[in-house]
Image (tube, rainbow, N blue to C red):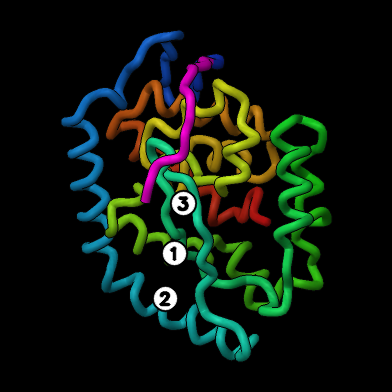
Amino acid sequence: MEPMSINYDFFSSSPEEDLGIEVISGQRLSYDRPGLRAAKRLIDLAICICALPIILPVLVLCAIAVKLDDPAGPVLFVKERVGRGGRLFKMYKFRSMAHTASDDKSHQQFMQAFVNGQIGQQTTGEVFKPKAQVTRVGRFLRKTSLDELPQLINVLKGEMSIVGPRPNLPWEVEAYKLWHHGRLEVLPGITGLAQVHGRSSIPFEQIVKYDIDYVENMSLALDFKIMLMTAKVVLKGFGAR
């Protein structure tokens, strides 16, 4: 697919002391190194392959649960997202909403206000994800983040990485400020620096600051730290929607 037309600028926020990050403002850093990108790719593939015997039964059980809970709808929710360099790809999730639910319009209204700093993230659920539209199984999948597991398919296809900024919808990217586009310099991820610092409980501007910090300081050591912190966050169910 053709990449979106985007401009890049960069923003550096304060260092993340708990992860040992030192931000150097205005410089292109780790993500410019092809060797690092290749190493990340190999680790992504190794994790997916090694975890397959454990994850496959979980995927099957989740798929069965989704279908039994709402038989009329599909198992997977597939939506076009914006990846590295503005390239579009189809991202997979387990469906967590009733098949008759349509949240596109209210979601778009919310995100436009959210990106512009006109609304707090804590209202997300009420604005574009009414609880009545979320299935019983869907609530559990979201709480445990199991709805994100199908994105391992995107990782295997090279469209995503295990760690990186979360991918946005095309019209969400169109609402970006100039410096927000820096998060498109790397492959999007299943988890990232923002996800271990509040997930859906922090403002969009702070999410992007975390993502830019990650882009400017990307390393294998940082990825492993984020993975460990993700496990802790998921077990606590913190910030899940």
Residue position marked by numbered label 2 in the rendering:
58
The mark found on residue 231 in the picture is: 3
Q: Earlier in the sequence, mark 2 or mark 3?
A: 2
**Element under label 3?**
helix
The mark found on residue 149 in the picture is: 1
- Write the start and end of the magenta stretch as one range: 1-12
- The CA distance from mark 2 to mark 3 is 16 Å
Image position, residue 5 (x, y; %): 47, 34
Please give the name of the residue rendered at 34% of the width and 40% of the height, measured from the top-left corner: 224
Q: Residues within 10 Å of mark 3 (few under 14, many from 20)?
A: few
Of tags 2 and 3, the one toward the viewer is 2
Amino acid on which disc 1 is placed: Leu
Principal secondary structure, stretch drawn in magenta: loop
Residue closest to the eye, 61 or 96? 96
Q: Earlier in the sequence, mark 2 or mark 1?
A: 2
- The CA distance from mark 1 to mark 3 is 13 Å
**Number of numbered discs overlaid on the protein picture:** 3
Where, by quadrant of the figure, is residue 128 drawn?
bottom right
Residue closest to the eye, 107 or 46? 107
Of tags 1 and 3, the one toward the viewer is 1
Are circles 2 and 1 on residues that touch, CB within 8 Å? yes
Amino acid on which disc 2 is placed: Val
